[in-house]
Image (tube, rainbow, N blue to C red):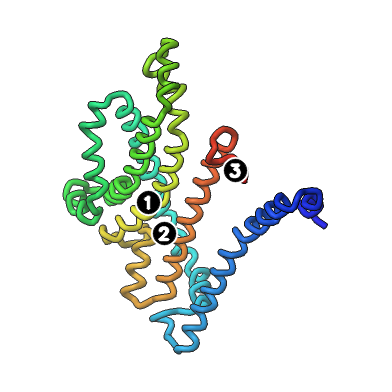
């Protein structure tokens, strides 16, 4: 008998039901996604077998996995190129987004003047902006970095600005009554209050920076040994090498999931001791 079950015996029926429900949810949170994933892979494999689909059209999962191992040197070297663009663009998005959000928080006139330009930059498709970047920027890496930064920048700016402007008015009035300067209010009140918003924007921007890096390489048509995963996908498509194409796609997907999980863990570690969103909620 487990400790939870022993504890449940000492509880009233409603409390015992809640404990069992929590235990089932903890198990289901991991078991259900894994079960659905295994079922989807099995169905993918069976469709290939039942319809006798050639591997250059739709390869079986085993063939894709074997290709991932066989071409690991090429694919992972390209992944490193993509990750370099991803993390550099994310870093620049954090520096630029937070810095500009702080400036907006200090002056409503600055926010009203420049925030519409950030919106225009966000809603304009990157494939439409890239021809201009291609004209004015010579360095290939800088082109890719700029494209990825444009995609990742707005969630950081928007969420941080929202957080800085969402401070409780009573707390702001208390700081003013105690003679706090605007920068003291920013440091001790507004920045801590904006932290959950910033971390939420960071999780969004992490995935978008990877998407931006891949899309930028697609529109740039980058090729060669030092190119990222997007170029491997383009090359595999031209050569009808579907196993490598699927392997590169899977690698991108798992990289995006890993980035999201790492940023979620960072957010939890920062917020777990003081913010409601990370504290265990009572049912």
Residue 91 picture quarter: top left
- Tell me, yes or no, if residue 115 can be seen here: yes
Q: Nearer the viewer, mark 3 or mark 2?
A: 3
**In terms of depth relative to the viewer, which is nearer, 71 or 246?**
246
Secondary structure of the residue carrying numbered label 2: helix
Q: Residue furthest front?
A: 13
Instruction: Point out residue 137 in the picture as x, y percentages from the top left corner.
Output: 21, 47
Could you tell whether 135 is left or right of 149 in the image?
A: left
- Tell me, yes or no, if residue 92 can be seen here: no
Q: Which residue matches tag 1? A: 208
Instruction: Point out residue 55 in the picture as x, y percentages from the top left corner.
Output: 43, 82
Q: Which residue matches tag 3? A: 281
* Measured Cα–Cα span from mark 2 to mark 1: 18 Å
Task: Say whether disc 3 or disc 1 marks the residue closer to the N-terminus.
Answer: 1
Which residue occupies 80% across, 55% down? 2
Secondary structure of the residue carrying numbered label 1: helix
Could you tell whether 134 is left or right of 224 in the image?
A: left
**In terms of depth relative to the viewer, which is nearer, 215 or 204?**
204
Which residue occupies 51% across, 79% down? 43
Instruction: Point out residue 149 in the picture as x, y percentages from the top left corner.
Output: 32, 45
* Measured Cα–Cα span from mark 3 to mark 2: 42 Å
Above or below, comparing residue 45 to residue 218 in the picture = below
Which residue occupies 46% across, 62% down? 251
Which residue occupies 43% across, 66% down? 248
Disc marking residue 78 = 2
**In terms of depth relative to the viewer, which is nearer, 279 or 76?**
279
Instruction: Point out residue 281 in the picture as x, y percentages from the top left corner.
Output: 60, 43
Q: Nearer the viewer, mark 3 or mark 1?
A: 3
Contact between labelled residues 1 and 2, with CB atoms less than 8 Å apart: no
Image quarter (top left, top right, bottom left or bottom right) of the N terminus? bottom right
Secondary structure of the residue carrying numbered label 3: loop
* Measured Cα–Cα span from mark 3 to mark 1: 30 Å
């Amino acid at each position: 008998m487990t400790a939870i079950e022993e504890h449940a015996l000492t509880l009233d029926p409603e409390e015992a039901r809640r404990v069992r429900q929590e235990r089932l949810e903890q198990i289901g949170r991991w078991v259900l996604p894994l079960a659905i994933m295994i079922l989807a892979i099995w169905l993918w494999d069976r469709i290939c077998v039942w319809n006798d689909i050639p591997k250059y059209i739709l390869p079986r999962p085993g063939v894709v996995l074997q290709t991932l191992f066989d071409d690991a040197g090429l694919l992972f070297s390209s992944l490193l190129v993509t990750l370099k663009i991803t993390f550099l663009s994310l870093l620049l998005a954090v520096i630029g987004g937070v810095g500009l959000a702080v400036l907006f928080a200090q002056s409503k006139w600055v926010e009203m003047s420049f925030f519409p330009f950030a919106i225009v930059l966000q809603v304009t498709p990157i494939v439409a902006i890239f021809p201009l970047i291609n004209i004015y920027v010579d360095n290939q890496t800088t082109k890719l970095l700029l494209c990825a930064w444009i995609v990742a920048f707005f969630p950081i700016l928007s969420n941080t600005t929202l957080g800085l402007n969402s401070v409780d008015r009573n707390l702001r009035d208390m700081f003013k009554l105690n003679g706090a300067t605007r920068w003291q209010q920013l440091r001790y009140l507004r920045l801590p209050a904006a932290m959950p918003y910033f971390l939420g924007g960071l999780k969004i921007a992490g995935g978008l920076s990877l998407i931006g890096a891949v899309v930028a390489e697609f529109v740039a048509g980058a090729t060669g040994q030092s190119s990222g995963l997007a170029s491997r996908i383009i090359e595999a498509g031209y050569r009808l090498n579907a196993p490598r194409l699927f392997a590169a796609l899977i690698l991108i997907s798992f990289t995006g999931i890993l980035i999201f999980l790492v940023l979620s863990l960072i957010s939890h570690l920062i917020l777990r001791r003081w913010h409601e969103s990370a504290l265990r909620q009572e049912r």
